[in-house]
Amino acid sequence: MSASRRSGTTDELGPDEPGRDGPEGSDGGGFDLLAALLDGMDAALCAFDVDGVVTHWNREAERILGWTAAEAVGRHGFAGWAVRKADAEEIEGRLLSAMHAPGRQVHEFALLTKDGGRVLVRTQSAAVRGPDGKPAGLYCAFSEVHAQIDLERSIALSEALFEDASWGVVLVDVDLRPAVVNAHAARSLGTGRTAVLGRPLGELLAQGVEELESALTHVLAEGAPPAPAEMWVSVRTSEGEKRRCWRSGFLRLASPLTEEPVPLGVGWLFQDITESKQVEQEAAQLRFRTHQLHRAARAAAECEDPAEAATVHLDFALAGFADHALIDRIAVIGGEAADGTADDGDGPVRLVRAAATPSGAPGPSVLAGHAGLPVRYGEGHPAVQCVERAGSVRASAGSYAAEQAREWAVQRRWPPDSVHALCAALRSRGRTLGVVTFLRGTGRSPFERTDAMYAEDVATRIATALDLAGLRGQDLDR
């Protein structure tokens, strides 16, 4: 017997009742048909009378929990066998409450198997009414919900990632185009969640797109890398390009419905670490520059000629800082003003080239003697402004095209490949002796405020050396 007990149940036929062992189609056949239907259900089914005694227990209930119908039917509730004693009262109360509630009641709790294991089930319970409409018992259908819970958790995780996650999540299809984007990623890309879908990554990123696409292609072909990758990119926004550093992780997505894995795309997760990376870079840069200044001071101390010591400071300062450098001293024609500029009327400041790095080829800075002929800097030239202000001046070709940038540099008497400049005044003992100009070429970033502070430190050391050499207002011919 699997569907109901044979004795003592509210719906059992008595032994003397007609049709008990009657032919097919009799009342006994109907009873057997009901039992067969209950046993054939995919869901486990049990029933309780009004006192909470188990009256039915089908085969699926046997399969899930291991208790046979003979062992289950006739027991009062689940206490001590199908649930822990500590949980029995609560679970029984939740189940029996369905007798007095309209419709079906849904609950989730753990039941005990015959061998002592625990099974998480989801139950649907409803009252069974007698002829008078009063509760005569209840039925309870239940099924294992591990698979369903896992599915619901996966859906909940996906929704959380795409709604509330504090890092970017992008699903990229096999054509390397975003198919799904969460809110954080959309903000990081400077656009809306729907506006980014299906667009090439090159339309979203100005720089770093080649590296990102290479990583995505590798993941599609070989699988996820063992560790996150840090990528610097430039994001196209309505306010212009923004340089960002993203720590990125990748997951290859494959269809679970096929025997052979069919790639569906790549899950790309990233976190913006720009600020922390900038702090790290600035700290490393500061350590390197301090080390360079220390090395320059030691090397310059061994130079017998102070003018040579000035070029040594310049060479050490260039490492990782700029591509070219120029030293221009003030040309004194008449008397000398208190601030060290030429006192020859109201004319512009005149600067004479004192030293420079080779243009177009690597090599150390060399002293340059031009018979005291001033460099033909135009009015408003950054070097002239620097001397007049006795402070640093930055200049850049900006977004000029290559040919325009070349013309910009040539007009200012700088090497043609220069696109960024930083001029720092050479001051010693309260006087302005000239200007040192640092130049960066194509592909380098513009000079920033921290660069200006470093340049001013280097300029002070160079000015001290030049002042010791007595090269102010003198020709440098050897």
Image (spheres, grey):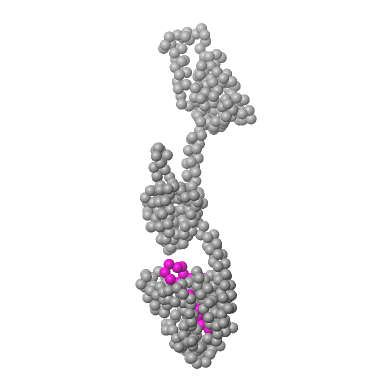
Residue 196 is situated, as x and y percent measured from the top left of the image, at: 40, 53
The residue lying furthest to the right in this view is 86
Rendered location of residue 197, percent (x, y): 39, 51
Position above or below: 231 against 419: above
Outermost residue, bottom side: 334
Residue most toward the left? 403
Question: Does 66 sit above or below residue 310?
Answer: above
* Residue at screen point 40% across, 57% down: 210
- Give the residues drawn in magenta, as a range: 431-449
- Residue in the picture at 40% in, 73% down: 417
Residue 184 picture location, percent across and down:
48, 53
In the depicted view, which residue is nearer to us: 321 or 297?
Answer: 297
Quadrant of res 402: bottom left
- At horizontal 46% and vertical 59% (from top left) the residue drawn is 232
Q: Within the magenta stretch, is there residue 24?
A: no
* On screen, residue 242 above or below 7: below
Q: Is residue 184 left or right of residue 90?
A: left
Question: Which residue does the image show at 54% across and 72% down from the upper left?
Answer: 454
Q: Residue furthest top?
A: 16
The answer to whether residue 401 is visible is yes
Where in the figure is residue 181, as x and y percent of width and height? Answer: 43, 50
Residue 137 visible within the image: no
Q: How many marks?
A: 0
